Amino acid sequence: MINLDGKRALVCGGTSGIGEAAAEAIRDCGADVVILSRSASGKNTIACNLEDLDSLNNSVSKEIENNGNFEILINNSGGPPSGPLIDAKPVDFEKAFLRHVLASQTLVQLVLPGMKEANYGRIINIISTSVKEPIVGLGVSNTIRGAMASWSKTFSKELPPSITINNVLPGFTATERLEELKQTLSKQKGISPNEVEKAWLGTVPEGRLADPSELGQVIAFLASPAASFVRGVSLPVDGGRTGSI
């Protein structure tokens, strides 16, 4: 049984999809969870846009000052719009780099002092299997996710002992984001959404989509003391789809 009693976790994008599943799994293991999201409301939430770094810095700093440090950080943000790389505009890359790499950098700088004080830290980035194999039709996303993986690997060499950073790489997971992508590809290819999904599942040895809760359980493990020697890893959770070693 994973035990996260006494730990505080900041989960970005924790109101839906994999982020929500991560928040639930970590909470079920005993941690106090604070959700950061544009649409967050109510207790134990921070309403903030990751593209506004000043607001992000101020909001999270205030939360730490008022309620204490975080030992766990889950970096998670919705992917950039789909489309071929040749059609991408500079602003597409700029916005994606801001909300993924720069926002994550800001958050690590904010939570790291508390992790050092606790002699315990877990930073987990929810990225994509595209860091192993680029996904056709996700040009900007492939580029930015790769940057996130390099950023994370660099931190794995710099962070002190007991503070780890790892990446979770979801495969095809039953989320609103995947449903939107399915509808987009359906229109682009002139085939039904079911045919799009069937083609996807043909590449997955497990033969199905992942449930977000399955990702949540992996994230909770990486956040736990049991994963103390796992560091700098990009872990596909994709039912065997990724072909690289």
Image: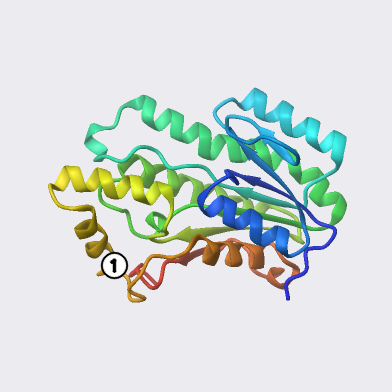
Name the amino acid type tagged 1: Leu
Under circle 1, the secondary element is helix
Number of callouts: 1
Q: Quadrant of the C terminus?
A: bottom left
The answer to whether 125 appears left or right of 123 in the picture is left
Q: Is residue 191 above or below residue 205?
A: above
Asked if residue 82 is positioned above or below residue 174 in the image, the reply reads above
| 215 w.r.t. 54: above or below | below
Residue at figure coordinates x 23%, y 47% from the top left: 185
Given residues 228 and 99, the one toward you in this image is 99
Q: Position of residue 154 (x, y in %)?
A: 58, 51
The quadrant where residue 110 appears: top right
Residue 157 visible to an observer of this rendering: no
Res 113 visible: yes
Tell me what residue is drawn at x 85 percent, y 40 percent: 67
Task: From the top left corner, tell me how far across and down residue 121 is, in percent.
Answer: 75, 56
Percent x, y of residue 18: 52, 54
Q: Quadrant of the N terminus?
A: bottom right
Residue highlighted by disc 1: 201
Could you tell whether 237 is left or right of 63 in the image?
left
Looking at the picture, how far across and down is residue 128, in whole percent? 43, 54
Q: Residue at x 77, y 57 (%)?
A: 31
Disc 1 crowd rating (10 Å Cα; few below 14, some 14-19, many 20+) is some
Q: Is residue 83 above or below residue 150?
A: above
Left or right, 47 with reference to 240: right
* Residue visible at 78% across and 63% down in the picture: 4
| Quarter of the view holding residue 53 | top right
Colouring rule applied to residues: rainbow
